[in-house]
Structure formats: structure tokens, C-alpha cells
Amino acid sequence: MMRCAGMVMAVVGALLVCLAGSAQAADAIKIAVMDQQAVIERSKAGKAALEEMKAYQATRQKIISADEQELKELEQAIQDPNSKLSEAAKQEKQEQFRGKVEAYQRRLQDFNREVQQKQREMVAEYSKKIADAAQVVAQKEGLIAVLDKGNESMFRIVLYHQPALDVTDLIVKEFDRQQN
């Protein structure tokens, strides 16, 4: 993450150096900012993708919850003082419990990996589509650059900007237009 942040800062620095050099030649340099996460959250296609992701996660969570319930019931059966299980049967249930715990942990890890992979794929797909929409808006508005301002949960590239520079709403509209 830090190496990626360093690369982003180097790119932004190079962009600013280029802009400073071309500032003398240009009358007005127009740069804008956008919030890529907001585009996903506010656009029709982005909302649908987020709902699909939630449904995907909910399906996995139901399976995990069923596994957890099965483990609780098995553990209670083993620990029940009124149980008439023989010592051999109790040991067999304990072995069964251990095996189910291991299977549960593997499934949980697998599901977490699957969800993370699906999220990465979604981000990659939508980042490209949002970049395309941002390019169209930049060309229409005569912008030389549109920077993603990021948010609190990500690395922030833009620490301050005037609100008038934010073209997120325009990009949401263009993104929706392109997805229809």
C-alpha cells in the first residue's frame, strides 16, 4: 500500500510539474476532482453492483451462520451433563466437533477470499468505466486533469479543493448514460 501511495504521489507530482510548465503557455488550466466511491454509490449501475455484492456476501453469511449453529449444537451435546453418551461416543463426538471446526475455518477463509476477489474484480471493472466517463466529462468541460480525491478509508490524493472543482455529479450522469 505504501509503495502504491508513493507511486501515486510521484505521478501527481509529475503532473503538477507539467502543469506548472504549461501554465505559462496556457491562459487557464482547468483541473477538477471527483470521488470515485461516490460515483459507484450514486450511479444506477454502481448501486446495482453494490446490491449484487451484498447479496453475494449475504448468501455466504447464511452458510457460515448455519455452520456456526451446527457447531453450537454439537458442542452443547458434548457438554450436556444429562447426556447418556458413553466415553467412547463422547470422544467420537469431540473428534467430529474438531473436524467440523477445521472445516468451518477453511470455509470461512475460502469465503473471505472469494468475497475479496469479487470486490477487487468489481473495483477494477468500475474503475475503468468511471475513468471512461471522467474522460468524456473532462473533454466536454475542457479539463486537462480529473483527480480522484479519495476518501477517509483510502489514501487521499487531494487534501483540499474548492467545491466548484468537484465534477462527481457530472461523472455520475455520464457514467449512467454510458451504462444504458
Image (tube, rainbow, N blue to C red):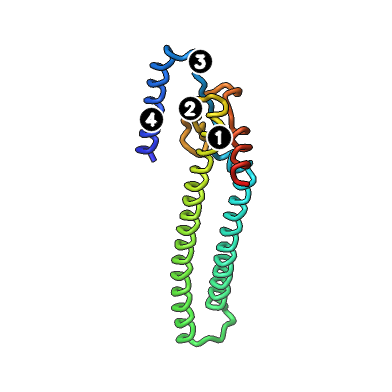
**Which residue is labeled 1 in the image?**
35
Q: Earlier in the sequence, mark 1 or mark 3?
A: 3
Give whichever of 53, 103 is nearer the camera: 53
Mark nearer the viewer, 4 or 2: 2
Residue at 57% across, 28% down? 140
Q: Amino acid at mark 4?
A: Val
CA gap between label 1 and label 4 equals 18 Å
Q: Earlier in the sequence, mark 1 or mark 2?
A: 1
Residue drawn at point x = 40 percent, y = 25 percent: 15
State the separation of the CA atoms marked 2 and 3: 13 Å
First-in-chain label (1 vs 4) = 4
- Labelled pair 1, 4 in contact (Cβ < 8 Å): no
Q: Residue at x 44, y 66 (%)?
A: 106
Categorize mark 4 by other alpha carbons within 10 Å: few (<14), some (14-19), many (20+): few
Residue denoted by label 4 = 11
Please tell me the numbered disc located at residue 28. Answer: 3
